[in-house]
Structure formats: structure tokens, C-alpha cells
Image (cartoon, helix red, strand yellow):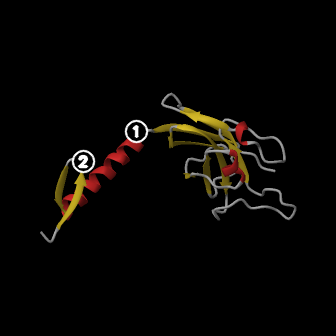
Amino acid sequence: MQNEVAYICPNSLIFMEKSSCFLLFILLCTLQEVQSQSSNVSVQLQITNVRNGKGTLRLGLFKNEEDFENEKPFKHIIVSKQNFNKNSIVATVVLPQGSYGISILDDENDNLKMDYNIIKMPKEGFGFCNYYHEGFSRPKFKQFLITISNSTKILNSKIRYI
């Protein structure tokens, strides 16, 4: 009985070997992963006005205004520029279903952050899915809030350079 652990269930006492507990744990984790994958959607992302094929595009997914203001996305996605063609990139990305905002950074030097000039203006391009920001201040979260569902097939973004 050294390798057995007792678990109390309603109305009974069940003994399981540690190896059985481990297998049950793996099974539950696998089921959770399969369930979360079924809530993901494959979407074609069409990004235009990309300056060059250097670096990567970095997507940040934000659940609310506060997370956007604090630059705390709940998910990061990196899009390669290997399909760069005539200032545009078309890529397929897997996104979770739900409502959130997607920002895009054209990280030309792959340093994982937006670079700014001496007067704090962005040196690299930026954009938002299904919204083009023309102002010089940050957009409000609700301006680029989108809903991803099984019927979502294409998202568009135009990169802006200042």
C-alpha cells in the first residue's frame, strides 16, 4: 500500500495508485487542450502598407482598455514577413473566439518593442485590425474592438508610419 493515495469521493473511499493519478491528470489536461483548440478560429490576416520585408510583425491581443493602456496583451502572435510582396503580407493566424482588440507592430529590427525618435514619435509602423488610426494620440480601445467567431474569415490592417 506504499504507492497508494486515498481520495475521498461522495459516499465512498477510492484508492488509486500514483501512476493512475498521473494518467488521469494527463487525460484531463489533454481534454482541456482539445476543448480550448475547438474555440480557436483560423483567420486570414491581410496587412497592407508594410514598408519592407525586414523584421517581423507582432500582434498584441487586448481584452479591455486598461490592458491596452498598460500594454499588457493576453496573447502575443508573431507573423513572419517571408511572404512580403508589394508592400503587403497575407498570413493565416489562429485566434481565440471572443471580443478583443488587436494591435500590430512592424518590428523592423526585431527588438520586441516600438522604437521612438527623439521627440517620442514612433520610428516603426503600427496598425490595428479592421481600423486605421489617423490621429497622433493613442486610439481608444473601442475603436479597434472586434469579435472573432466561426464566421470570421478575413481581418484587414493598414500599417501607418509617422
In what quadrant of the picture does the N terminus appear? bottom left
Residue that mark 1 sits on: 38
Task: Name the residue: 68% across, 47% down.
Answer: 50
Q: Residues within 10 Å of mark 1 (few under 14, many from 20)?
A: few
Residue 43 coordinates in the image, percent (x, y): 52, 37
Residue 20 coordinates in the image, percent (x, y): 19, 58
Residue 126 coordinates in the image, percent (x, y): 71, 49
The part of the image, by quadrant, that contains residue 25 is bottom left
Of the numbered discs in the image, which one, if any, rests on residue 133? none
> In front here: 32 or 38?
32
Residue that mark 2 sits on: 10
> In front here: 85 or 5?
5
Residue 81 coordinates in the image, percent (x, y): 58, 51
Residue lying furthest bottom in this view? 2
Is 15 placed left or right of 62 in the picture? Answer: left
Task: Name the residue: 83% across, 48% down.
Answer: 137
Task: Name the residue: 56% across, 47% down.
Answer: 83
Q: Determine whether the residue tagged by mark 2 lies in a helix, strand or loop.
A: loop
Q: Amino acid at mark 2?
A: Pro
Residue lying furthest left in this view? 1
Q: Residues within 10 Å of mark 2 (few under 14, many from 20)?
A: few
Q: Amino acid at mark 1?
A: Ser
> In front here: 135 or 53?
135
Q: Is residue 149 above or below residue 108?
A: above
